[in-house]
Image (spheres, rainbow, N blue to C red):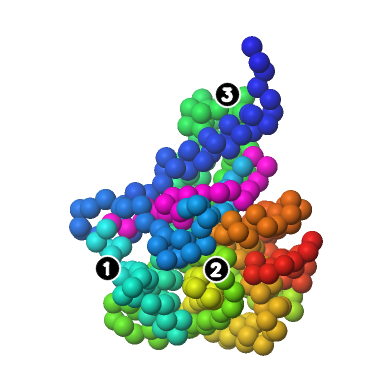
């Protein structure tokens, strides 16, 4: 009988964790007091038609997927990419009709209403992911505190020796992860409810927006919410500490025929912090701005899709640089000047 290699065991553990996350994933509508009685649908956080289709090749895009050695750029079909089960069909249609881009609806990068609707979907996706993380780490902590290696082995579908390792270290890993998820859920829930109220009333006095475009053929699409830790000179903008009101910004990146639009939204209480950042970004020359926006996407936006026409043109070394930067900034922030000058919109060297 062939012995299972260490890499195969690691792959099995990683696959087990992915399945465990999927097993606890929320399957209900997140709209407050939803009473439609309809199940949550598999909706795209980044629109498939007109957006993902514009950067796809053979119906596929590149996205980061977890592997035993870390996140790896992987081809994903656009029917599956960026989906989540966060809304029933009624509320998905009601909330996002104004940004269902097509023959009847065009993107207006100056429309606060459109940016707010796109941001609501971004925040909903991030909130859904954090709630799933909360459920996963709560269950893992319970199994660890009960010293239930058999329960871990069954849940993750791994051998008992690996399960015992999980039990030994789960509390040290899951406890801070759970704290972080619960802090994020609290912040994102406030933003989520605020955006729903603003869209319902048509008044966007609590939201500040900024848009900028890169004039190239479609290459990336993204959606997310994240803190901006550093300004463009390397100065601190925010601190990731419990009890601190973390300054976060939402971003949607939408490619069109001859330009890619970067649409930002933040709460007005952070306007002093972010207005200076975006003024500096606007003043940067075009080449520097393309690099800064590319770095921002890799370091801050997990819900990122890249055209195969871009990734396939990179060398193996360039692809490795992108994957390492993504991994290196999953749990810690880096100043822009300290990371490679990656450019999704043109040629670059390592």
Q: Few, some or many C-alpha atoms within 10 Å of disc 2 (few <14, some 14-19, many ≥20)?
A: many
- Secondary structure, mark 2, is loop
Q: Quadrant of residue 170?
A: top right
Q: Few, some or many C-alpha atoms within 10 Å of disc 1 (few <14, some 14-19, many ≥20)?
A: few
Per the model, the C-alpha gap separating discs 1 and 2 is: 28 Å
**Taken as a whole, is the magenta stretch helix, strand or loop?**
strand
Query: Which is more N-terminal, label 3 or label 2?
Result: 3
Disc 3 versus disc 1: nearer the observer: 1
What number is the disc on residue 160? 3
| Residue 230 as seen in the image, left or right of residue 44 | right
What number is the disc on residue 218? 2
Instruction: Residue under label 1, please give it.
Output: 94
What number is the disc on residue 143? none
- Secondary structure, mark 1, is helix
62 is higher (above) or lower (below) than 223: above
At 37% from the left and 71% from the top, the residue drawn is: 101
Per the model, the C-alpha gap separating discs 3 and 1 is: 48 Å
Per the model, the C-alpha gap separating discs 2 and 3 is: 48 Å
| Residue 318 as seen in the image, left or right of residue 63 | right
At 59% from the left and 56% from the top, the residue drawn is: 308
At 74% from the left and 66% from the top, the residue drawn is: 348
Q: Quadrant of residue 248?
A: bottom right
Q: Are marks 3 and 1 in contact (CB under 8 Å)?
A: no
Q: Which segment did they paint magenta? A: 68-88
């Amino acid at each position: 009988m062939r012995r299972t290699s260490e890499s195969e065991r690691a792959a099995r553990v990683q696959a087990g964790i992915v399945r465990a996350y999927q097993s606890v994933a929320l399957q209900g509508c997140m709209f407050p007091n939803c009473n439609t009685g309809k199940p949550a649908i598999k909706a795209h956080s980044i629109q498939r038609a007109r957006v993902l289709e514009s950067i796809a090749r053979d119906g596929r895009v590149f996205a980061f997927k977890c592997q035993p050695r870390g996140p790896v750029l992987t081809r994903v079909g656009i029917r599956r990419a960026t989906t989540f089960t966060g809304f029933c069909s009624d509320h998905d249609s009601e909330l996002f009709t104004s940004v269902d881009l097509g023959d009847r609806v065009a993107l207006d990068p100056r429309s606060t209403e459109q940016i707010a609707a796109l941001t609501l979907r971004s925040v909903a996706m991030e909130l859904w992911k954090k709630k799933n993380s909360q459920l996963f780490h709560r269950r893992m902590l319970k199994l660890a505190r009960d010293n239930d290696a058999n329960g871990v082995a069954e849940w993750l579908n791994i051998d008992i020796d690996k399960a015992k390792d999980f039990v030994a270290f789960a509390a040290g890993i899951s406890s801070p992860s759970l704290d972080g998820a619960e802090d994020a859920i609290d912040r994102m829930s406030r933003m989520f409810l605020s955006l729903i109220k603003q869209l319902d009333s048509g008044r966007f006095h609590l939201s500040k927006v900024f848009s900028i475009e890169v004039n190239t053929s479609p290459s990336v699409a993204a959606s997310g919410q994240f803190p901006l830790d550093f300004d463009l000179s390397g100065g601190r903008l925010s601190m990731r500490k419990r009890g601190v009101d973390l300054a976060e910004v939402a971003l949607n990146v939408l490619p069109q025929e001859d330009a890619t639009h970067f649409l930002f939204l933040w709460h007005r209480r952070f306007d002093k912090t972010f207005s200076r950042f975006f003024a500096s970004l606007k003043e940067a020359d075009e080449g520097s701005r393309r690099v800064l926006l590319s770095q921002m996407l890799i370091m801050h936006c997990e819900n990122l899709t890249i055209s195969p026409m871009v990734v396939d043109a990179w060398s193996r070394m360039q692809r490795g640089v992108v994957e390492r930067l993504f991994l290196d900034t999953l749990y810690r922030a880096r100043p822009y000047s300290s990371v490679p000058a990656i450019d999704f919109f043109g040629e670059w060297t390592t």
